[in-house]
Amino acid sequence: MDDEKILIRNASQVVTCSGFEAKKGAAMSDVGVIEDGAVAVSGGLITHVGPTEEVMKQIDASEYLEVDASGRALLPGFVDSHTHFVFGGYREEEFSWRMKGDSYMSIMERGGGIVNTMNATRQASYDDLFGDAYDRLDTMMDMGVTTVEGKSGYGLDLATELIQLRIMKELNDEHPLDVVSTFLGAHAIPPEFAGRTDAYVDYIIEEVLPHIREEHSVTFCDVFCEQGVFSIEQSERLLNAARTHRFKLKLHADEIVSFGGAELAARLKAVSADHLLHISDNGIKRLARSGTIATLLPLTAFSLNEPYAPGRQMIDAGCAVALASDLNPGSCFSCSIPLLFALACIQMKLSPEEALTALTINGAAALGRAKKIGSIDVGKKADMILLKFPSYKFLPYHVGMNLVDTVIKDGVLYIV
Ligand code: NIG
Ligand code: FE
């Protein structure tokens, strides 16, 4: 028997989410269910998908390690396409203040928030940052995540931004999960540039950006475009410079106030615009007409006790919606896929099919990887999960409970 060959058979459902690009609007409802399905894997890639009876005819089962998946549903691994998982320290005091009515932005204006984590990250040892980030990846994987994006943005100087990015590159090599890195130098204004936001943008463009992409396999550049942080003009200037260094673009857009971030992301042909709690009607129209994915982060709205992004309205308007956790030490200390799934369905009114598409193929597209991951299609990476239950419909129904039984990452089985 070849160790690298695995046959998962008699799954009550194989939910393929089949596709090689983002699904928009009504197409998000099409998840592709095969009853009593099987998937064959060889060398870490998917080679056969179909009803068990048919797959068994196409292969020599004696060459395979067989997994009997009766009573369990097989899904693509989840893609968490927006997180900030490498950081030092915690901000539990700020959370308590917020519970008493303080706001995220007023804490930031008083010198807390992201700059608080910047201080802790600058002071932390490499090994501590690495170890904590490794543990967070373990937690994500237990909940069925097989690819995760991570952002820098807690260094806010060249040296510390590079440390965060180096940690993500090493984790991509050392941890089973795939890690996609994003440079978020424009996350906040560090104290040494207080009151001089334009000078900080110049510093990033001239002294930081040229050193990032090649050295550390960084794919994306992102900006926290928000009133009182980086303006539309500053964000555009920075992202245009990033494009000349061959970064793909992302944007934290319309998170706290309606600011025109979605429109900017569409105009710059960004891969995704993220958050969008306060997106305007015009912003929704612009995203729907563009190739830019609307990445929604309901765990953040929940943690900040803010209104949810209008996910239902966006899908009805024809947008491609992705869902992600936004795990970070401030606005959302959670990477809980089960809770995220429930909030997307119960609060944002996505159907279970739409939420599943948003967390798989559309998440993959938000990372520019829809041709390689995000669905159970022949030729894609064997990144899949087996649920403890027979249908994907249990995901929002068993509210906030982890239903993942086994994670299959690059064709290797991990029992949760
Ligand atoms: O996506 N809003 C900007 N960035 C993060 C929060 C970061 C933090 O508070 O540490 C977010 O919500
Ligand atoms: Fe974020």
Image (tube, helix red, strand yellow):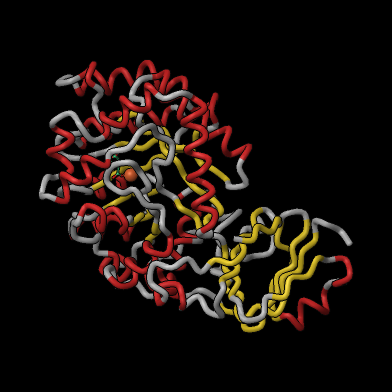
201 up-or-down from 296: above or below: above
Query: Where, by quadrant of the figure, is residue 389 drawn?
Result: bottom right
In terms of depth relative to the viewer, which is nearer, 335 or 178? 335
Ligand 2, seen in the image, is in the quarter at top left
Q: Position of residue 396 (x, y in %)?
A: 40, 73
Q: Eyeballing the image, is 278 above or below 63?
A: above
Q: Nearer the viewer, residue 275 or 409?
A: 409
Q: How many marks?
A: 0
- Whether residue 61 sits left or right of residue 11 in the image: it is right
For the C terminus, give its image quadrant: bottom right
Residue beneath the point at 24% across and 26% down: 189
Q: Residue at x 19, y 60 (%)?
A: 307
Q: Position of residue 308 (x, y in %)?
A: 23, 61
Q: Give the left or right position of residue 16, taking residue 362 as reference.
A: right
Q: Position of residue 77 (x, y in %)?
A: 56, 60
Quadrant assignment, res 415: bottom right
Residue 98 makes an appearance in the image = yes
The residue that appears at 70% across and 55% down in the rendered structure is 412
Image location (x, y in percent) of residue 374: 55, 59
